[in-house]
Amino acid sequence: MVRNTRVLGESASSILRRLLSLPIPLLKDSDASSTLSPSAQNGDAPDSADMLLSFVISPQYRGQRNVTEKFLALLGFLYQQHQSEFEKVRGLAGRRRAYFGRSESEITRSGSHTYPREIPQSPYWVLTNASNHHKREIVQRALQQLGYSSNVRTTVAGSLE
């Protein structure tokens, strides 16, 4: 089971769901309730975490043809939900490479073979020449910058497969 772990702290249930191509539970089991906000657990209106978890189980997201397309769709969704806060994510970078920028050239200048792509429906660009594991780490860090809980970050990053 450990060799199938993709994200630090990923639960055995999450690994099995991924390996068996089962949907990520949202409201049905006790594992899922720990990722939902108190408002959702009480039946109140959904908050951004609930909307994000719903997005990653949606056909729109799951139907993307590869991890890079899911990565872009996820970042586009996050931008739509956090337009005023998304600038925080722009500060994420590696040792030499910028992960996010306001233009293609901003990312291209930070290294070779970065393959920047525009985040859908946003003024931001993102580096896409990263391993799938690295893309999951970038998503985890972006979600942390935007204030999501550890459980939500792990679940969402694990959806990039």
Image (cartoon, rainbow, N blue to C red):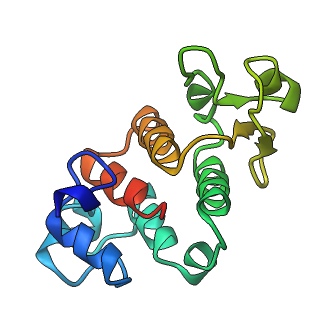
Which image quarter: residue 156?
bottom left
Left or right placement of residue 159 versus residue 13 in this view: right
Q: Position of residue 151 (x, y in %)?
A: 25, 53
Left or right placement of residue 94 versus residue 80 in this view: left
Q: Which part of the image, by quadrant, shows the N terminus?
A: bottom left
Which image quarter: residue 89?
top right
Which image quarter: residue 33?
bottom left
Residue furthest to the front in view is 3
Q: Position of residue 152 (x, y in %)?
A: 32, 54
Tell me what residue is drawn at x 52 percent, y 51 percent.
132
Residue 110 sits above or below residue 143 on the image? above
- Asked if one can make out residue 142 in the rendered structure from this viewpoint, the answer is yes
For the residue pair 99 and 20, the one nearer the viewer reads as 20
- Asked if one can make out residue 26 in the rendered structure from this viewpoint, the answer is no
For the residue pair 119 and 127, the one nearer the viewer reads as 127
Tell me what residue is drawn at x 43 percent, y 64 percent.
159
Tell me what residue is drawn at x 69 percent, y 37 percent.
127
Residue furthest to the left in view is 30
Left or right placement of residue 56 versus residue 18 in this view: right
Left or right placement of residue 98 versus residue 131 in this view: right
Q: Position of residue 140 (x, y in %)?
A: 41, 42
Tell me what residue is drawn at x 34 percent, y 74 percent.
18
Q: Give the mark count.
A: 0
For the residue pair 28 and 140, the one nearer the viewer reads as 140
Residue 31 sits above or below residue 108 on the image? below
